[in-house]
Image (cartoon, rainbow, N blue to C red):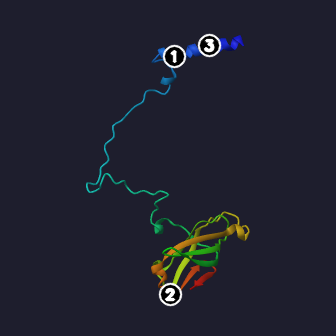
Amino acid sequence: MRGLVTLLTISSLSLAGCSGFGDSRANPANWFGPGRTAEQSAPVQDPAANPLIPEQSNSIFRRKSDAETYAGTPIYAVQNVVVAPSAGGAIVKATGVSLRQGAFDVRLWPENGGAPVDGMLTYTMRAIQLVNTPQGPEQTRRVSAGQFVSSQTLDRVRGVRVLSQTTTATSNR
């Protein structure tokens, strides 16, 4: 026990003594060298840009335009479509089955720009689907998606159709 206390006392005194050697290599503060600063030129700004408004960037709250970034493909089959009333319109809910497990970012992609054609509002159920995942049982491949439709659009609609690779599901008024 005495040897341990003696060793700790000697090592703490020698470490505290390193602060007296400001330029010494024994001082841990000097091991990485002095810090350096460099001047940088100021970024060039557009004179018409408001410096108080930040530049737009992608985040979880703001996405790029969907046409540029969404890489979804139609799912294998649509099982059912339900149009549920909501405040200010309705929510179109679709359930389908992907060909493989692991499908994500499922969306109801509007066809014809989201406008009804001959009274039918048409969507394609799309998802980002990986090709290197197992197929698995149907319940592990089931996916759902929803889309809000305003009451102004519903006034011109008599039915909603959801397309997939192999099937089509329809809900009529």
Q: Where does the C terminus fall, quadrant-wise?
A: bottom right
Closest to the camera, between mark 3 and mark 2, is 2
- List x then y, in percent, for residue 119: 50, 87
Outermost right residue: 137
Return the residue nearer the eye: 38 or 157. 157
Disc number for residue 18: 1
Question: Which sits earlier in the primary sequence, circle 1 or circle 3?
Answer: 3
- List x then y, in percent, for residue 24: 48, 17
Return the residue nearer the eye: 89 or 13. 89
Q: CA distance from mark 3 to mark 2?
A: 89 Å
Q: CA distance from mark 1 to mark 3?
A: 15 Å
Question: Which sits earlier in the primary sequence, circle 1 or circle 2?
Answer: 1
Disc number for residue 119: 2
- List x then y, in percent, for residue 89: 50, 76
- For image coordinates 56% across by 69% down, the residue present is 72
Q: What is the quadrant of residue 96 in the picture?
A: bottom right
- List x then y, in percent, for residue 169: 61, 81
The kind of residue on which mark 2 rests is: Gly
Q: What is the quadrant of residue 125 in the picture?
A: bottom right
* Kind of element beneath mark 2: loop
- For image coordinates 45% across by 80% down, the residue present is 152
Kindly check if marks 1 and 2 are in contact, taking CB atoms under 8 A apart as contact: no
The residue that disc 3 covers is 9
